[in-house]
Image (cartoon, helix red, strand yellow):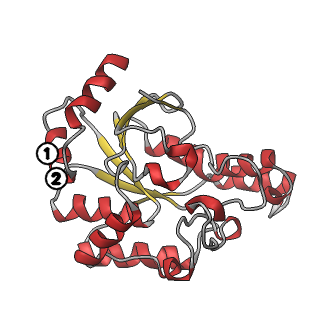
Amino acid sequence: MKAYITELNEKFEHKNLAESFAALQNESFQSMSFSTSFGQEDQVITDFILRNALPVNIFTLDTGRLFNATHQVQEATEKKYNTYIDTYFPESNAVEAYVAKNGINGFYQSVEQRKSCCTVRKIKPLQRALKDVDLWITGLRSGQSSNRQQLSLFQYDDAFGLIKFNPLIHWSLEEVVAYLENFEVPQNALHKEGFVSIGCEPCTRAIQPGEEIRAGRWWWENSKKECGLHLNTTAQ
């Protein structure tokens, strides 16, 4: 697998977005899925997939604690492209058990409780969404945080047991915004209020000038700003 990942990275290294998705058709991937949280990077990929009618399934995770503005972006996106984006919710009994044990906002109490909440609301639904998928496409960019600077175009995700493709990994935020404006892609209204990386409402704040893009996520913690969806990736 390591040799194949290296081969993919070398083969796709100098391809643009269109060339990369065209080249994917020549690989042996039987099922390709893109996970969107309706952030700016994700909206670039969503637009490209839907405008070009590519054979990629698009899905999202609804944690039950999202901003209404995020739901508005989903609604606007589905309307613009005349599509439905598969939505995965956490299991109700798992949420009930978490709240009974930790309280409705128990994630503020410790990193352990916050990660437990992320597991219930994000990771478990993601496991269902990625079942039988052999290529997971994401909107990750190396410029989003120091944690993501070592990511490559293709990597193997140890936790989910599949290859991950990050087509925007080398894009700048300026390139992302320019694309969205050029193709008039729906965007979250919160971006204009200082929210760059947007997750669950109680876990996201606007960032201050000079702060890292993901500084507004779980701002009360000193740990790495990740929920667990992208931590178990083997860099090549």
User: Few, some or many C-alpha atoms within 10 Å of disc 2 (few <14, some 14-19, many ≥20)?
Assistant: few
Query: What residue lies at 58% left-to-right and 74% top-to-bottom?
Result: 67
Where the C terminus falls, by quadrant? top left
Q: Kindly identify the amino acid type of the residue bearing the numbered disc 2.
A: Ala
Between 224 and 212, the residue placed more toward the observer is: 212
The residue identified by callout 2 is 18
Tell me the element at label 2.
Answer: helix
Task: Give above or below for 129 relative to 155.
Answer: below
SS of the residue under disc 1: helix
Name the residue type under label 1: Ala
Q: Which residue is mark 1?
A: 22
x 15%, y 40%: residue: 23
- x and y percentages locating residue 189 in the rendered image: 48, 82
Name the foreground residue: 79 vs 5: 5
Q: Position of residue 20 (x, y in %)?
A: 20, 45
Left or right: 18 in relation to 34: left
Q: Which mark is residue 235?
A: none
Q: Quadrant of the N terminus?
A: top left
Distance, label 1 to label 2, CA atoms, is 6 Å
Q: Left of 228 or right of it: where is 19?
A: left
Residue 55 point in image, percent of width and height: 20, 49
Assess whether mark 2 and mark 1 are in contact (beta carbons under 8 angstroms).
yes
Figure check: 131 above or below 41: above
